[in-house]
Image (cartoon, rainbow, N blue to C red):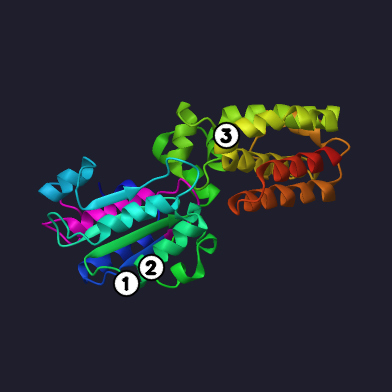
Amino acid sequence: MQFDSIVGQDRVKDYLTNSVKKDNLTHGYIFEGPKNIGKLEMAKIFAQLILCKNSKEKPCEKCSSCIKTNANSHPDIHILKLDENSIKRKDIDELQNSIYIKPYESKKKIYIIDDSHKMTVQAANTFLKTLEEPPEDTIIIMITINKDLLLDTIVSRCQIINFEMLGHKEVEKILVQEYNIDSEKSKLLAGYSKGNVYKALKILDGEDKTLEYRDEIVNIVDKIFEDGKRAVFDYEKYFNSGKDNIDEILDILLIWFRDILFVKENISDMIINKDKLEVLEKQSKGKNSIRLAEIYDIIQKTYDDFNKNVNYNLIIDNMLLKIQEV
């Protein structure tokens, strides 16, 4: 794997490469940024470069270390990913049991913790002890959407690496120029890409179900506007079954209500869902612009509350009722 395989993030690539070249590595990193922007991929390539036996500028792809990393079989690279909805104390206990063992075949061993903000309080407090006295041969990379969701005492002991989203216009330009996708389609894909070209391409080929979710959400909003509170309770089951994808669903809602507001205010050049313009115009009729803007804020608050583990059914019911009141 190479850093060039990740679109954008040149500042991060340069910083990580120079850290290896100058042997200026720290024991703890936090990779912070939006979902699906390449943080986990960057962490894997960073780990590969650190352990590469032939180069400090880019992974050589030829040494035994690079070959094993690419095959996901390197004994000194450990990736902790969620099997459930949180990282529990037992997961961190298992990490600690191995962290003081010497590397098998490299000078260092690397631990990558995906969705690190989903540690339980017990897990986070246990993990803090590891960061306070880390083994010299160990590097820990924590991946999160927001460092503020981690304990301050954990954040203070790590180097923060911020990942930035590509702008919609930048993603749109790449889709048009490098992938020959027409401008109208590129604008739609870029709007739902979260600044990630690869997500946009997955949406295009149907591997990513964003547009399917969008059609479901559009129908739900339609029904709530038409049928009021009765429809709100009818769709509780939908949101309960979609809990694992709620961040995606809320992102779609944000974009959809943003477009309803733009239609209401006649800002046509900013509309992402132009293929659904007739529905947007229908849903904007009789609506108050101020109230529509308030719904946008409520959806954003729902997203924040979900990531703070506020009662799920409560925040969803509140959001749907507020939408109905518009």
Q: Is residue 28 left or right of residue 304?
A: left
**Span shown in magenta:** 31-60
Give the secondary structure at mark 2.
helix
The local crowd at label 1, few if under 14, some if 14 to 19, many if 20 or more residues have their Cα within 10 Å, is few
Q: What's the CA distance linking mark 3 and mark 1? A: 54 Å
Q: 227 and 168: which one is in front?
A: 227
Mark 3 or mark 1, which is nearer to you? Answer: 1
Q: Residue at x 32, y 49 (%)?
A: 79
Q: Position of residue 150 (x, y in %)?
A: 50, 62
- Depth-wise, is mark 2 or mark 3 nearer the camera? 2
Residue 167, numbered circle: none
| Disc 1 residue type (three-letter) | Glu
Q: Amino acid at mark 3?
A: Glu
- Whether pointer 2 and pointer 1 mark residues with C-beta atoms closer than 8 Å, the reply is yes
Q: Which label sits on residue 184?
A: 3
SS under mark 1: loop
Q: Which residue is mark 2?
A: 129
Q: In the figure, residue 230 lies in which quadrant?
A: top right
Callout 2 amino acid: Lys
Residue 241 is left or right of residue 294, and the answer is left
